[in-house]
Image (tube, grey):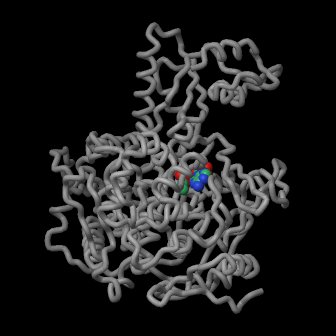
């Protein structure tokens, strides 16, 4: 065992960064032989009010996972305060508005610190305290970043809800976490569209009893309906408020945030992350995967409403003292060159986006790229879904000019940070392959009985056999659901829900979900969740939803619906169903195809044979396999004939 490990700690930065493949191999080995020693060393470089008594306590049966117990800290002291001396005047945040003609915003670390403290004081003034759950439903504006950090500053648990979700989805999330406060804005811009954010909050709150206060940030200057005694304007509240706010001292395992995500069954669940482990993992993975350097300008295009935005737009880069770019708009507004224009404008050196965006921009043609130099770029990242080889090469050639490594980063809301990925320029890179696991991450592939598949050139279910600091601790309010969802399928293992291949050299390639989760443009939906939404439509008796390959979105949503009577106008019915889904979940979950059927292929025990529905949706009806156990085999022919 190599206790003598020589991490290369840069003189200007205080984190461990692996610099070549040989070192990676050594560090990886040590992280397996002596995980506690390894993580204790990584954690050393943070600011702790008090260090931990024990590094790790765990079992995957209950599950019970605790990192750095006994430690006291506040993550915002690590994101902000500790940088003030050396990086007070360095840019922390650059914000680019939806409209390129409008002015961008820049905050130094000192300015961000002051804004977070002020926002934290406003939260306290309005009754928020440690342990309270606060829902944040906001546009991608600087105040969103500030609000998230302000919650963490006072020890309140943030639950950010992506501002594309409907009132009904928001209400479910607010009620599940029993939030006492909502932070929002008047309205938002997204491309050519404007969305009445506060109106959606008002509608959601009709179904929520626990919310006592709503803090509204003015963004577009819309007149909005404010409820007396409950709703306040941030700009009124912040008048004369101090720019200093002492950070709340948190225990290592105190909740930092809840983020809702979809699984194969039921409503979305609240994934819980805690203070110390998440912090350590966010910075460690950020610095190593992207090979971050002090002079970088880093841009992650994800919305803070998703885990990628939490860990790699906000926490990871700020922990590392980086300059992070935040963009309000969409990649295609005003045209498909917008991303590249922003890269040139700010001299972005590390760029992190999703395959769906790459495919959409690829489809718009390379002309949109050619007018920009892109000289500043040195590392490219991909996240959220498998990246097909064509998109990978386009990204590598046209954006990276074949000079920037592409890191295909595999991870999940539940993992808190990147788990399997090439470390840029350090470990091997192969198109459409995530690569090797990060040191500290122990993936295994198992067969359907849960037996480990040891060789290379194999395929199996992707699991983790050892904990890592950024992992999920529980699902909010329902620990048993966490156990069943992740720790009961294969005994003693965390099951990811993904299938993966390992090539002859041991590099991982993620194939995709093996459960009833669809990944649409990098966003996760449970088929059951969409079916439930569709069934809200008064004409629908029953529905079944499957994913199918989609050129841009990765997967599209294909819905089979049974109606109470055959509709006169199918197009009207389809629009109504889409409208129901938009109301129940949000625009992002709109079905791409809706086929009206008279029945579904069910087994005698009443189970829908999704395999058949998937094949039809994929347009592959040549071999549907054994259909003899179906209650009504004839239905298959009808479904095949009506396929869209
Ligand atoms: C998928 C997003 C292939 C995977 C960070 C996972 C990926 C789910 C990749 C998690 C990748 C994420 N290659 N598939 N690089 N990254 N996925 O929770 O199926 O929104 O289980 O987290 O996205 O989605 P989530």
Q: Residue 483 sits in which quadrant?
A: bottom right
Residue 550, image x, y percentages = 55, 35
Residue 317, image x, y percentages = 43, 71
In this orientation, which residue lies closer to the viewer: 579 or 102? Answer: 102
Residue at image location 55% in from the left, 41% down from the top: 554
Q: Can residue 380 be seen here?
A: yes
Image: 106 above or below 545: below
Judge left or right: residue 141 versus residue 395: left
Residue 368, image x, y percentages = 36, 47
Q: Residue 509 sits in which quadrant?
A: bottom right
Image: 384 above or below 420: above
Q: Can residue 278 be seen here?
A: no
Where is the C terminus found, in terms of image quarters?
top right
Image: 434 above or below 390: below
Judge left or right: residue 44 versus residue 349: right
Residue at image location 42% in from the left, 67% down from the top: 349
């Amino acid at each position: 065992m190599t206790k003598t490990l020589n991490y290369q700690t840069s003189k200007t930065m205080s984190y461990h960064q692996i610099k070549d493949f040989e070192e990676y191999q050594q560090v990886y080995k040590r992280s397996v032989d002596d995980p506690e020693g390894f993580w204790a060393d990584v954690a050393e470089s943070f600011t702790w009010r008090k260090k931990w008594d024990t590094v790790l306590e765990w079992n995957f049966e209950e599950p019970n996972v605790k990192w750095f117990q006994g430690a006291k800290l506040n993550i915002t002291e690590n994101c902000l305060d500790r940088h003030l001396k050396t990086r007070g005047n360095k840019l922390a945040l650059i914000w680019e508005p939806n409209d390129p003609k409008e002015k961008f915003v820049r905050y130094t670390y000192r300015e961000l610190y002051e804004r977070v403290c002020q926002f934290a004081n406003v939260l306290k003034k309005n009754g928020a305290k440690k342990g309270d759950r606060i829902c944040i439903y906001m546009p991608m504006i600087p105040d969103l970043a500030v609000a998230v950090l302000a919650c963490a500053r006072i020890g309140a648990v943030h639950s950010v809800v992506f501002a594309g979700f409907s009132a009904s989805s928001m209400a479910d999330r607010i009620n599940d976490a029993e939030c006492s406060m909502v932070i929002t804005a008047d309205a938002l811009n997204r491309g050519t569209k404007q969305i009445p954010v506060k109106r959606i909050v008002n509608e959601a709150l009709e179904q929520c009893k626990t919310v006592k206060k709503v803090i509204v940030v003015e963004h577009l200057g819309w007149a909005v309906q404010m409820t007396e005694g409950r709703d306040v304007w941030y700009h009124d509240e912040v008048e004369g408020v101090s720019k200093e706010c002492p950070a709340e001292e948190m225990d290592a395992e105190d909740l930092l945030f809840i983020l809702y995500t979809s699984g194969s069954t039921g409503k979305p669940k609240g994934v819980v992350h805690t203070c110390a482990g998440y912090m350590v993992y966010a910075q460690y993975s950020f610095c190593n995967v992207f090979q971050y350097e002090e002079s970088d300008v880093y841009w992650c295009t994800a919305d803070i409403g998703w885990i990628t935005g939490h860990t790699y737009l906000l926490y990871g880069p700020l922990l590392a003292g980086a300059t992070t770019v935040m963009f309000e708009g969409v990649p295609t507004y005003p045209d498909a060159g917008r991303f590249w224009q922003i890269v040139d404008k700010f001299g972005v050196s590390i760029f992190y986006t999703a395959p769906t965006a790459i495919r959409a921009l690829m489809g718009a043609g390379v002309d949109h790229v050619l007018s920009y130099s892109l000289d500043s770029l040195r590392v490219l990242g991909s996240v959220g879904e498998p990246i097909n080889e064509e998109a990978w090469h386009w990204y590598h050639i046209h954006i990276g000019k074949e000079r920037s490594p592409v890191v295909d980063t595999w991870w999940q809301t539940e993992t808190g940070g990147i788990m399997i990925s090439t470390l840029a320029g350090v470990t091997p890179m192969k198109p459409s392959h995530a690569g090797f696991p990060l040191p500290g991450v122990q993936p295994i592939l198992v067969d359907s009985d849960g037996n480990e598949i040891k060789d290379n050139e194999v395929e199996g279910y992707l699991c983790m056999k050892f904990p890592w600091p950024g992992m999920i601790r529980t699902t909010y309010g329902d620990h048993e659901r966490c156990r069943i969802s992740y720790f009961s399928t294969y005994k003693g293992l965390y099951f990811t829900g993904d299938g993966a291949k390992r090539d002859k050299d041991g590099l991982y390639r993620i194939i995709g979900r093996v459960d009833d989760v669809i990944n649409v443009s990098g966003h996760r939906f449970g088929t059951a969740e969409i079916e439930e939404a569709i069934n809200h439509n008064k004409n629908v008796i029953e529905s079944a939803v499957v994913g199918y390959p989609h050129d841009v979105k990765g997967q599209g949503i294909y819905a089979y619906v049974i109606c109470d009577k055959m509709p006169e106008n199918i197009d009207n019915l389809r629009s109504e169903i889409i409208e129901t889904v938009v109301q129940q979940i949000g625009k992002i979950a709109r079905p791409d195809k809706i086929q009206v059927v008279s029945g579904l292929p069910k087994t005698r025990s009443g189970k829908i044979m999704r395999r058949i529905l998937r094949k039809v949706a994929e347009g592959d009806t040549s071999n549907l396999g054994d259909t003899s156990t179906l209650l009504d085999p004839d239905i298959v022919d009808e479904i095949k004939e009506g396929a869209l």
